[in-house]
Image (tube, rainbow, N blue to C red):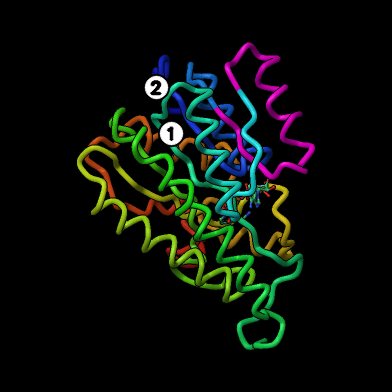
């Protein structure tokens, strides 16, 4: 794992009760960062995750709130910044597939207007709301934003066309915000491939599928956390970049 000294740094990570978000919170906290873990207020795992970090002697607080709801996101980010006494890093990681079963692109009926509204609000507007409130504090600290996009936003083939479109839009927003907020705040994204997490949408994960990935396995949350750490604490001349972290999946099938 790469290393960094994050003493005196603070981070707000959305969707941090589990998966990539929790691994990021744990990695940052282990390096001395004060972390605020956001997740949905009714997600019981949020308290458990915060307690797990506190038990290790790390500095962690809960920042419950629905990032897809403007009022909730606004008060959650404001409160977290107050509690942390300023913000160095914002990781817009919360996301939803909105479905437990993949919806093929030729199914034009299942993704109705409510489905589109849900995915747009969580996957796209959430990062927008959180960024808007966090920006003044990030500017003061020469901070950084990392958005969790997806290879589905680049190459498609995600849980639904709606999901792919929201992640493609998040990539566009990342580039726009990099242009807007430099040089004081850098804005980048990671584009995960297959993730070993409790993600709501279950894809059939056959051995054959995993063998087709050049790295021969799904990515662990820690693999993605490390990329986020690099884009926050390192990469001082990197902004507007979409870092694909997919074990080589989008380069094409493994040759071996
Ligand atoms: N799992 C995958 O295959 C995959 C692939 C590519 C990208 N991603 C992206 O990675 C990110 C993290 O997903 P993960 O794989 O770690 O899954 P996960 O389910 O472990 O984590 C997602 C977290 O976001 C939270 N969340 C959902 N809606 C929220 C909201 N409105 N407000 C606050 N929190 C909310 C969930 O409760 C959950 O704890 C997501 O943005 C997802 O789109 C996942």
Label 1 sits on a secondary structure element that is helix
Q: Please report the bounds of the magenta region as a residue range.
A: 36-60
Disc 2/disc 1 C-alpha distance (Å)? 8 Å
Instruction: Name the residue carrying label 1.
Output: 229
Give the left or right position of residue 234, taking residue 82 as reference: left
Question: Was residue 196 drawn as part of the magenta stretch in this picture?
Answer: no
Q: Residue 37's x, y, as percent?
A: 60, 33
Q: How many marks?
A: 2
User: Residue at the location (29% across, 42% down)?
Assistant: 186
Label 2 sits on a secondary structure element that is loop
User: Residue at the location (35% across, 38% down)?
Assistant: 144
Mark 2 CB within 8 Å of ligand 1: no
Instruction: Name the residue carrying label 2.
Output: 4
**In this rendering, does residue 173 appear at all?**
yes
Give the left or right position of residue 251, taking residue 42 as reference: left
Discs 2, 1 touching: Cβ within 8 Å: yes
Q: Residue 41's x, y, as percent?
A: 72, 41
User: Residue at the location (61% across, 70% down)?
Assistant: 117
Quadrant for residue 146, please give it.
top left
Quadrant for residue 86, please give it.
top left
Quadrant for residue 99, please give it.
bottom right
Front-most of 42 and 60? 42
Q: Residue 242's x, y, as percent?
A: 37, 54
**In this rendering, does residue 206 appear at all?**
no
Front-most of 68 and 111? 68
């Amino acid at each position: 794992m790469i290393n960094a000294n994050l003493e005196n740094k603070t981070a707000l990570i959305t969707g941090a009760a589990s998966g990539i978000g929790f691994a990021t919170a744990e990695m940052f906290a282990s390096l001395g960062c004060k972390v605020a873990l956001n997740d949905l207020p009714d997600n019981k795992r949020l308290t458990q995750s915060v307690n797990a970090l506190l038990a290790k002697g790390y500095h962690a607080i809960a920042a419950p709130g629905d990032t897809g709801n403007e009022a909730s996101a606004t008060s959650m980010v404001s409160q977290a910044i107050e509690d942390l006494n300023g913000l160095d890093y914002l990781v817009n990681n919360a996301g939803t597939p909105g479905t437990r079963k993949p919806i093929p692109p030729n199914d034009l009926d299942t993704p109705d207007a409510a489905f589109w509204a849900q995915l747009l609000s969580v996957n796209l507007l959430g990062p927008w709301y959180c960024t808007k409130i966090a920006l003044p504090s990030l500017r003061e600290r020469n901070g950084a934003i990392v958005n969790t996009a997806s290879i589905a936003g680049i190459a498609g083939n995600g849980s639904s066309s709606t999901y792919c479109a929201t992640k493609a839009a998040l990539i566009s927003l990342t580039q726009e915000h990099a242009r807007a907020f430099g040089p004081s705040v850098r804005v980048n994204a990671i584009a995960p491939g297959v993730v070993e997490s409790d993600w709501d949408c279950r894809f059939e994960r056959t051995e054959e599928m995993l063998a087709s990935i050049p790295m021969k396995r799904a990515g662990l949350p820690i693999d993605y956390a490390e990329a986020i750490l690099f884009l926050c604490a390192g990469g001082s001349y990197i902004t507007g970049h979409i870092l694909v972290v997919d074990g080589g999946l989008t380069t094409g099938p493994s040759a071996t």
